[in-house]
Image (spheres, rainbow, N blue to C red):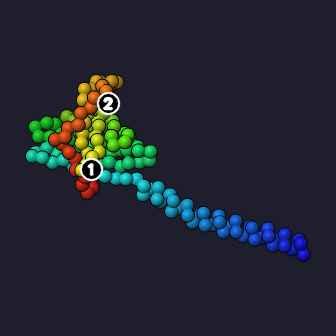
Amino acid sequence: MRINFLKLGVLLFLCISCKDRDAQKEISPEISESNEASKSIGCYSYTMNQDTIYLSITILEDSIVEGNLTYKLYEKDKNQGRFSGKWIGDSLFADYEFESEGAISTREIFFFKTDSGLVEGYGPVKDTLNKIVFQEHSTLILNENIRLEHVDCD
């Protein structure tokens, strides 16, 4: 009789284990889908007179971002391209590779997140290995006159 209880116990254990594994298999696809959904996409725009700036951003894992940025400023050459970088608190630092007048260039960009959107920062720059970068992040100044407001993505 003792052997039958032992066999019954092992059989019961195996059944429960198999059910748990099946339940885990069913849960796994939902978890991976929610990871995909955790990517955050946002769009921001500034329009004043004949100036337009449009930024679309995708936030990936660990505050890593990528997106598109277009500047159409009155009486200046249009430039548009892609950027990739990282959020550090409310600050976005990224490398922006863009085309303007047929040439491809790369420069560092900085945006600060506010309740109403994004404000671009600027400061002294230097040319390093064919890329324009800020000399010192601590000296950056926000251009409060140009605020990119959150908009629906097209």
Circle 2: residue type: His
Residue 7 vs residue 111: left or right? right
Residue 72 vs residue 82: left or right? left
> In the rendered image, which residue does mark 1 sit on?
115
The 10 Å Cα crowd at callout 2, few under 14, some 14 to 19, many 20 or more, is some
Q: Residue at x 59, y 63 (%)?
A: 25
Question: Which comes sooner in the sequence, label 2 or label 1?
Answer: 1
**Quadrant in the picture for the C terminus:** bottom left
Q: Quadrant of residue 126?
A: top left
Circle 1: residue type: Asp
Residue 74 vs residue 22: left or right? left
> In the rendered image, which residue does mark 2 sit on?
137
Q: Residue at x 79, y 68 (%)?
A: 10
The 10 Å Cα crowd at callout 1, few under 14, some 14 to 19, many 20 or more, is few
Image height of 11 relative to 139, above or below: below
Helix, strand or loop for disc 2: helix
Tell me the distance, in whole angstroms, between the alpha carbons under discs 2 and 1.
22 Å
